[in-house]
Amino acid sequence: MIETLLRYPRAFIFSLVLHVVVIGLTLLEFSDRSVTPVVTKKGPQDQTIQAEVIDQKKLEQREQKIKQQQEAKRKQELEKKRLEQAAKKRAQELKKKKEQEAKRKAEARKKAEAEKKRKAEAARKKAEAEKQRKAEAARKKAEAEQKRKAEEARLKAEAEQKRKAEEARIKAEAERKRKEEEPRRKAEEEARLAAEAEQRRKEAELKARLAAEERQRELDNMRQRYYSLIREKISRNWRQPVNAGNMPECEVRVVQGPGGVMLDVILGQCPGTREYRLSVEAAVLKSDPLPQPEDPELFERDLRILFKP
């Protein structure tokens, strides 16, 4: 109500003034009724006529005044009613507007809540769909990986089976060939071993022969050095006699014992004078003991020495 009056201040002032006027007229009417009529000391008839005239005028005035007051009151009530209706209408409009605004806000809030719920539901569904998609993708990936591993294991098993079968086939084929070729291979192996043995024998013989020849050459060289040492010692101990005469090569046979100890000296073919032969024999005896050979294998009990001055 206050909000309505504040919105229509002129109507409020007019209504207030109207109420004040009506109240004033009512008070005036009550005051007129309380006035005591003036009684003159005229005659009874005059007084009666005058009273009637005055009363008639007053009645007409009062009636006119009452009519005016009633008209004013009616107008006031009509205005008041109009103002009340306008205020009520405005209040209804305001209430309706507020209700509409509240309804609009409620609808907007409801719509916002519905939109929020829709978005939340959409987000939930999207998240759920994404979760399901990822789970499905993970499941498919796991299935694919499982299939891949199974296929890989199958192929590996098949390859391993084929490899083993091929190995078995190759082994069986090799065994068959080996059995088929065993006699020939054995004969060839025996021939090869015999040839190798013969080759080794020949090589051993050759090696032994070469070693024997080498040993013989070595012994011959050592023998030559041995005889040269004996001849050199005898030559150092030989003294040329005065009547040596002709001094040809002289053969001397020496029997020796261990350590080169001379056991016997025998002159073989030794042409020349007697003094020459004796000088050779004395030189041989003076050379006792004889030099030892480098290798004991060269030791000879009977030595045949050719001496030439």
Image (cartoon, helix red, strand yellow):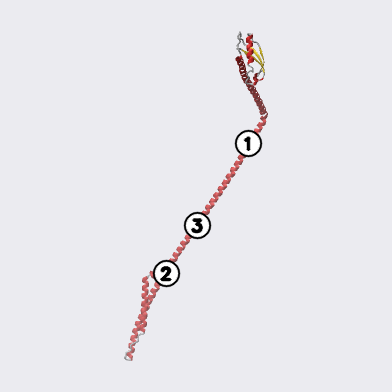
Answer above or below: position of 147 versus 296: below
Mark linked to residue 91: 2
Q: Secondary structure at mark 2?
A: helix
- Say which label, 2 or 1, has the lower sequence index: 2
Q: Are marks 3 and 1 in contact (CB under 8 Å)?
A: no
Instruction: Give residue 307's mark.
Output: none
Residue 5 screen position, x and y as percent = 39, 71
Quadrant into which the C terminus falls: top right
Disc number lying in front (3 or 1): 1
Q: Is residue 247 above or below residue 179?
A: above
What amino acid does circle 2 point to?
Ala
Q: Amino acid at mark 3?
A: Ala
- Residue 58 shows up from this direction: yes
> Would you identify the image quadrant in which residue 305 lies?
top right
> How much space separates mark 2 and mark 3, taking CA atoms?
40 Å
Which residue position holds label 1? 167
Residue 298: image location, x then y, percent: 64, 19
Label 3 sits on residue? 120
Q: Earlier in the sequence, mark 3 or mark 1?
A: 3
Secondary element at image label 1: helix
Q: Quadrant of residue 79?
A: bottom left
Q: Amino acid at mark 1?
A: Glu
